[in-house]
Amino acid sequence: MGLTIADLKKGERGVITDSSSKDIPLKLLEMGCLPGNEVKLLQLAPFYDPLYLNVNGSFLAIRKDTAALILIERIDG
C-alpha cells in the first residue's frame, strides 16, 4: 500500500489518488475526499487521533484508521 492521509505530518499537503475502499464512509466522499482533491493536515489531537484536515476548502476531522484508507501523493513545498 502507498502513502495515505494518516502518513502526513502537520502542515504537509497531498493530492488524493484513491478513495475507493468500501470502508470509507459515504459522507467523507460527499464532503470532498475524492481523487484529484488536495488535502492538508492542519492539526493532530493529543493522541494523534482524530486528524483535522482541509480537503479542497472543507475542514474535516477524521479518525486515523479511516485516514489510512485514503491514498495520496505528497505535494512538495
Image (spheres, grey):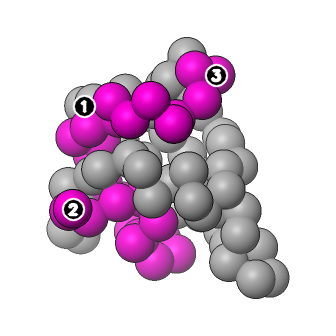
How far apart in space, not on screen, are marks 3 and 1 (Cα)? 17 Å
Q: Which amino acid does label 2 sit on?
A: Met
Q: Which residue is drawn at 38% across and 35% down?
A: 21
How far apart in space, not on screen, are marks 2 and 3 (Cα)? 23 Å
- Local crowd size for mark 3, using a 10 Å CA cut-off: few (<14), some (14–19), many (≥20): few
Quadrant where the image shows the C terminus: bottom left
Q: Which residue of the protein is positioned furthest toward the bottom in this rendering? A: 47
- Local crowd size for mark 1, using a 10 Å CA cut-off: few (<14), some (14–19), many (≥20): some
- Local crowd size for mark 2, using a 10 Å CA cut-off: few (<14), some (14–19), many (≥20): few
Q: Where is residue 39 in the image (x, y as percent from the top left)?
A: 42, 47
Residue 37 visible in the displayed image? no
Q: Where is residue 23 in the image (x, y as percent from the top left)?
A: 51, 36
Q: Where is residue 15 in the image (x, y as percent from the top left)?
A: 27, 46
Q: What residue type is labelled 3?
A: Lys
Viewer-side label of 2, 1: 2
> On residue 36, which mark appears?
1
Instruction: Compare marks 3 and 1 and give the one earlier in the sequence.
Output: 3
Quadrant where the image shows the N terminus: bottom left
Q: Residue at x 47, y 66 (%)?
A: 6
> On residue 27, which mark appears?
3
> On residue 1, which mark appears?
2
Q: Which residue is drawn at 76% across and 83% down?
A: 47
Q: Where is residue 59 in the image (x, y as percent from the top left)?
A: 66, 40
